[in-house]
Image (spheres, helix red, strand yellow):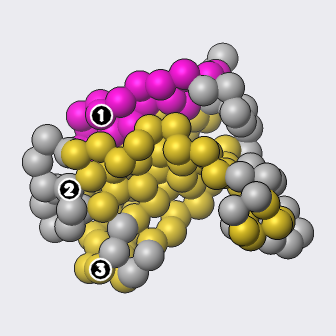
Amino acid sequence: GNLYISTIVTPKTGFVSLVFRESAVSAATPGPGGTVNPIIGYYYLVDPFNAGYQLTRTDRVKSVTVIPNTPLAQKPATDFAMGVLAQGQQITLYVNGVPLSTITDAGMQSGGIGLCTSGDAIFRDVQVYSLKS
């Protein structure tokens, strides 16, 4: 549904992701390019070490890059805030309260949330707000 998610993150290695409108399927699904992650949803990834971000939508068949790897205006500090505002088909991504990109995508409209990293990171002060339509 409609929601706002934010967290403070301290990555030590690798990238960090907010996963939203997600759901788990029982097992990994074979797709055209190999096996697809059993967690489906939107992955908002920030790579603070290379100062970039992207948004990917993963469904039972494939992953689609909705926003390709895009440079951040500046490299984030050691601790930084990530946020997502999802209202209907409109999704806005934030770092430190600054909007980075707003897109329209009808791929997924509801689901849970998750936090993940490719390395070692600390997530804290996670806030999730359900918004009215």
**Which type of secondary structure does the marked residue at label 1 adopt?**
strand
> Residue type at mark 3?
Thr
Rendered-image quadrant of the N terminus? top right
Q: Residue at x 80, y 54 (%)?
A: 60
Q: Looking at the image, which residue is at 29% across and 43% down? A: 70
In this rendering, the count of numbered labels is 3
Residue most extreme to the right: 26
Question: What range is drawn magenta here?
Answer: 86-104
Determine which of the numbered discs, if any, sits on residue 22 in the image: none
Residue 126 can be seen in this image: no
- The image shows residue 97 at horizontal and vertical percentages of 26, 38
Quadrant where the image shows the C terminus: top right
- The residue tagged 1 is 100
7 or 57: nearer the eye?
57
- For residue 36, what is the image quadrant? bottom right
Q: Earlier along the polypeptide chain: callout 2 or callout 3?
A: 3
Q: Main secondary structure of the magenta part?
A: strand
- Asked whether 4 falls inside the magenta stretch, the response is no
x%, y% of residue 11?
A: 29, 72
Q: Which residue is label 3 attached to? A: 13
Front residue of 32/128: it is 32
Q: Quadrant of residue 106?
A: top right
State which tag comes first along the sequence, 2 or 1: 2
Q: Which residue is mark 2?
A: 51
Q: Residues within 10 Å of mark 1 (few under 14, many from 20)?
A: some
